[in-house]
Image: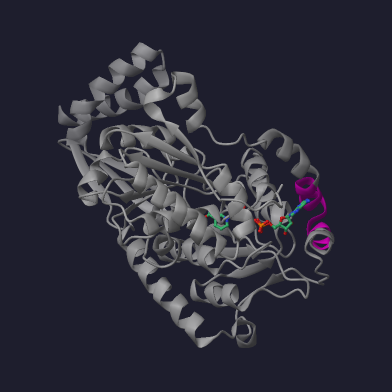
Amino acid sequence: EIPPSPGPIKMRTSDLSKTTHEQRSQLLRRPVLKSEEMISKVKPIVDAVRQRGDAALLELTAKFDKAKMSSTVIFPPYAPETMQLDEEVRKAIDVAYANIRKFHEAQKSDEPLVVETMPGVVCTRFARPIARVGLYVPGGTAVLPSTALMLGIPAQVAGCKEIVLATPPRPDGSISPEVMYVAQLVGASAILKAGGAQAVAAMAYGTKTVPKVDKIFGPGNQWVTAAKMLVQNDTDALVSIDMPAGPSEVLVIADSTANPAFVAADLLSQAEHGIDSQVVLVSVDLSLEHLTAIEEEVDKQANALSRVDILRVSVAKSLIIKVKTVEEAFEFSNDYAPEHLILHLENASQRVQLVENAGSVFVGAFTPESCGDYASGTNHTLPTNGYARQFSGVNTLSFQKHITSQEITAVGLSALGPVVVTLADCEGLSAHANAVRVRLNEAAKSSV
Ligand code: NAD
């Protein structure tokens, strides 16, 4: 779908004050995800792995990743020669690891919550790690050690006992040294050298060699996403997933203080992900000269970037939305619910309170999204496609579950019991009422 014709790399512009309600809804919409069609396509792959296990996994890996192997799983200790890195890259990964770990450790809920709701009635909530997790690190078209960090660190911090990291192998059957290095840093207990739907199925059901997991995390192409959705609905698999994933997106809100070169660079850093990436600029009453300066920067910078062919398509599909006020800008942004939201605004930090829906927010001129993508500390696995309305990005709590408990004394039951009996009788559940009455009767006898 990449057109050969050069020409200016330019976004489309809409003035929100001149759009109808229907046109506005159209602007908020992403390209339709064909999830049903994809699910029927991945089903034979998932079924093959479920039924024939390792044999199917090896065949599919030979077919899709061109890697002929005798085994797809490796366990620690991982051979040091598989993770030899350029010193600069190793140091950069180490800094990113430290920052991401620091931020995700602070999110951990270790202390139980203890509340005495009535005298003698104590309710508690405590966290436990999900025992076995599967992390999908995409590897088809790019090497993504950053995704291995973003999924592996919260799993490690949460205390997950088994961490299976799956990623497609290279044709020689190896994994990139960067991903191997991160796998070791985060304490992966197994590495599955497989990709796509077959990797997801292997982790969901387990095979003779691949450990079964309880929850599968991570981004991936449409094969990966559809397989995650399929296995999560199969009660035999008994597995959950982090969130539905779609193409990456950014919304930038800019006012007259915005630096055109920074705004353009931020838009392009997202648009380079793929031709289906979504990039939106909300212009808060920018002058014609200011907007033109941004458009010129987009064209100039895009032409100097390595993925200019992808940019040509994704930028052409992208939007500039003109609004008059900051409030209108946030109203649009909150309705759009972007994965990434960048604020090029005067007093940007004070505007964060206007954010209702977004995966992650980047505040002020010196906060490029790239920092959050790699190394500042926040997670880059975030809800797309408007799911920021109801989903949080991946975080330490995504790797834990919360268990409640309660302990009631005889005094507590004497006050609470009659309330419960009344409600149970009201619902016609006499055994529920009885479980309280036998105790109240016993307590009445012993107090006589
Ligand atoms: P991938 O690892 O997701 O997929 C590669 C696998 O897809 C292969 O191993 C193969 O098994 C399967 N596959 C490919 N073509 C197939 C076919 N015709 N039939 C069956 N299976 C097939 O890697 P990718 O393709 O490079 O995609 C990576 C995706 O992850 C991109 O969409 C990227 O935008 C996304 N991503 C998102 C984030 C994020 O945080 N949002 C981060 C990194 C990557």
Q: Going by the picture, which residue comes out furthest to the front?
A: 289
* Percent position of residue 321, x then y: 41, 36
- Which color scheme does this rendered protein use? one colour
Along the line of sight, the residue nearer the viewer: 367 or 302: 302
Residue at 62% across, 34% down: 32
Question: How many numbered marks, from 0 up?
Answer: 0
* Percent position of residue 118, x then y: 17, 33
Residue at 44% across, 19% down: 21
Along the line of sight, the residue nearer the viewer: 73 or 388: 388
* Percent position of residue 180, x then y: 59, 75
* Percent position of residue 162, x then y: 55, 64
Along the line of sight, the residue nearer the viewer: 47 or 94: 94
Image quarter where ligand 1 lies: bottom right
Residue at 22% across, 38% down: 409
Query: Above or below — where is 57 with respect to 173?
Result: above
For residue 122, what is the image quadrant?
top left
Residue at 51% across, 55% down: 299
Residue 395 appears in the picture as rendered = yes
The secondary structure that most of the magenta stretch takes on is helix
Q: Is residue 407 left or right of residue 183?
A: left
Residue 184 is inside the magenta segment: no
Q: Is residue 265 left or right of residue 134?
A: left
Q: Is residue 183 left or right of residue 405?
A: right
- Magenta residues, start to end: 45-58
Residue 47 is inside the magenta segment: yes
Query: Above or below — where is 174 with respect to 275?
Result: below
Q: Quadrant of the C terminus?
A: top left
Residue 130 appears in the picture as rendered = no
